[in-house]
Image (cartoon, grey):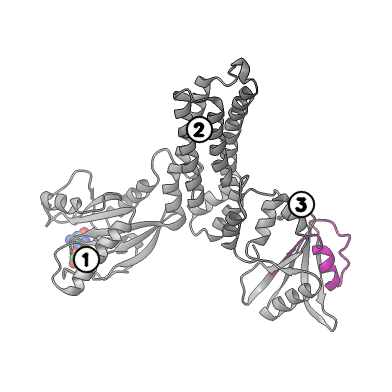
Amino acid sequence: MEQQNLLDRTTIVALSTPPGVSAIALIRLSGNDAITITNKVFDKDILNANGYSVHYGSIKNEENAIDDVIVTIFKGPKSFTGENSVEIACHGSTFIQQSIIELLLQNGATMAKAGEFSKRAFFNGKMDLSQTEAIADLIHSTSSAAHQIAMNQMRGGFSNDLKVLREKLIHFASMIELELDFSEEDVEFADRTELHKLVSEVIEHVNKLAQSFKLGNAIKNGVQTVIVGRPNAGKSTLLNGLLNEERAIVSDIPGTTRDTLEESLTISGLEFNLIDTAGIREAKDTIEKLGIERTFEKINQSAIVVYLYDVNRTNAEEVEKDLSTLNQNASVVVIANKADLPKTAVIENAILISALKKEGIEEVKSALYNTVVEEGFNLESTIVTNARHYESLIRTNEDLQKVIDGIDSGLSGDFVAMDIRQALHHLGTITGEISTDELLGNIFANFCIGK
Ligand SMILES: Nc1nc2c(ncn2[C@@H]2O[C@H](COP(=O)(O)OP(=O)(O)O)[C@@H](O)[C@H]2O)c(=O)[nH]1
Ligand SMILES: [Mg+2]
């Protein structure tokens, strides 16, 4: 890994702001020659400039000045990539952007590939893999919860958790391996009872991290939430109430909503993808039948099912019947609507609201939020948002379970040590202590060019 980087002496360049016209654009260079290359096209001498210094001047080709710019110098290792770096802030015309990049290429720079700046930061030990992945998450975060988790991960919160776990396991693996050197003497450096206890603790910790993925994934991608119930229960009215706008058509003609309608709603920094549906009942015509089929499709894809019924019209038995048809894997929030009318059925645990009068909407919001942010988790704790990390955590625990089984059955030290090493391997793929070219290629290819 290090080898590959040492050979890579190129200086890369890319536009780091979005392509297109803007007030200001930022062009970034990184590599040994970043400063010397820039110096060749800049009218100020920056060869001996200090790191973190800023210079105003113009970029020129052989004939004329292209633009007046601000150049910021970063000297390796005190830069994002760990290499010498230069940031050129120019006016955001696409012509200027391209002319400057072309000029830099002519003077020895190479066009950066997707994620190459981050890749260099990783190879130069500026951050580990999970931290570089957090940068991608940070860039794409659209809610305060997603932002907070990405920030925590980028700053190394998750990495530190893993480091502690790794160190504990490494310690025990080496104790056991030491025993192997003294195998004639039949000694035990690693107390098996203590090892058992330690591995159980690590399993518990890894489990908690793995469990947080449900929340993390929801935070990153939005929580798929479907609103279902019989026609006229008030689903569309509730959707409008939650969004605080007249988004869906409300009508007293049953079966008005025929297709599904999706809208995004943020509750305390958490994003929900709300889906209003045709509802569940025996269809009266083909179009409605399609709508109802779509409803069940959406129910099966959702993390939360909001089941709404009309307290004035629906009896407890009917509610029970409806509930039994719903997705068993989703969390179901039961809402009794039309509280302003006389009630025929009030189900225990149902949230009583009047969608029409906008009463109880806040209760519905907190119920949705609490369904996702379960007890034991909060946004300050480490939350796994990345499917790759989740997979690795699961693998780690499978190996650790083998360690436990091995100890329980009095397996010899070398086998136990092998299982610990295997667990360490899987744990190490998260932060990148263990990595393959293929893995790295996949990760960085998903970054933007210029990042
Ligand atoms: N009295 C009363 N009527 C409601 C309430 N919520 C919805 N409605 C009415 O019930 C009818 C059906 O509402 P709609 O939202 O279209 O139901 P959907 O078919 O489940 O989407 C409309 O006439 C609404 O105005 C409520 O809380 N109280
Ligand atoms: Mg409707």
Type of residue at label 2?
Val
Name which quarter of the figure residue 189 lies in: top right
- Disc on res. 207: none
Type of residue at label 1?
Ile
Position in image of residue 240 (x %, y %): 31, 64
Position in image of residue 46 (x %, y %): 86, 64
Residue position for label 2: 202
- Closer to us: 259 or 386: 386
Q: Earlier in the sequence, mark 1 or mark 2?
A: 2
Residue position for label 1: 292
Q: Earlier in the sequence, mark 3 or mark 2?
A: 3
- Closer to us: 313 or 304: 304
Which of labels 3 and 2 is toward the front?
2
Magenta stretch: give its range: 26-52
Q: In whole angstroms, how far apart are the C-alphas of marks 1 and 3?
A: 59 Å
Q: Which quarter of the rendering shows the C terminus?
A: bottom right
Position in image of residue 115 (x %, y %): 63, 61
- Disc on res. 78: 3
Q: Earlier in the sequence, mark 1 or mark 3?
A: 3
Q: Residue at x 64, y 20 (%)?
A: 182
Determine the residue located farthest toward the bottom in the rendered image: 63
Look at the image and tell me whether residue 278 can be seen: no
Q: Is residue 149 magenta?
A: no
Position in image of residue 30 (x %, y %): 75, 61
Mark 3, secondary structure of its residue: loop
Q: In whole angstroms, how far apart are the C-alphas of marks 1 and 2?
A: 47 Å
- Closer to us: 256 or 204: 204
